[in-house]
Image (tube, grey):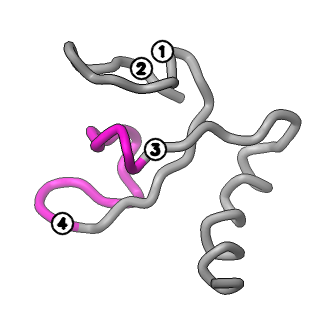
Amino acid sequence: MIGEIGAGTQTGLAVGDSVMAMVVNRASHGGYSESVVLPADAVVRIPAGKTLIEAATLPMNGLTAR
């Protein structure tokens, strides 16, 4: 869930949106962090009606299909 959006960031997302992201494990954050700061283009809204568990499978399914 988006907790904050940086000043001047242009995105169609809003605080409170349920989102998923591709996280590259570098520096002090990783995929197991409770919260991370990411570029807006690394984050997408979870499709309506999907659970967090269902949404978690989507990036790998897409990469596999690709």
Q: In this rendering, which labeled residue sits more in front, label 3 or label 4? A: 3
Of callouts 1 and 3, the N-terminal one: 1
Disc sitting over residue 15 in the figure: 1
Q: Main secondary structure of the magenta part?
A: loop
User: In terms of secondary structure, where does tag 4 sit?
Assistant: loop
Q: Is residue 37 left or right of residue 2?
A: left
Q: Is residue 56 above or below residue 13?
A: below
What count of labels does the image hold? Answer: 4
State the residue in front, 64 or 50: 64
Q: Which residues are magenta?
A: 26-42
Disc sitting over residue 3 in the figure: 2
Q: Are marks 2 and 4 in contact (CB under 8 Å)?
A: no
Question: What residue is disc 4 on?
Answer: 26
User: In terms of secondary structure, where does tag 2 sit?
Assistant: loop
The residue at the far left in this view is 27
Disc sitting over residue 39 in the figure: none
Q: Are marks 2 and 1 in contact (CB under 8 Å)?
A: yes
Q: What is the C-alpha distance between the residues marked 2 and 1?
A: 5 Å
Circle 1 crowding by C-alpha within 10 Å: few under 14, some 14–19, many from 20: few
Q: What is the C-alpha distance between the residues marked 3 and 2?
A: 13 Å
Q: Are marks 3 and 2 in contact (CB under 8 Å)?
A: no
User: In terms of secondary structure, where does tag 3 sit?
Assistant: strand
Which quadrant of the figure has residue 34?
Answer: top left
Question: What residue is disc 3 on?
Answer: 43
Q: What is the C-alpha distance between the residues marked 1 and 3?
A: 13 Å
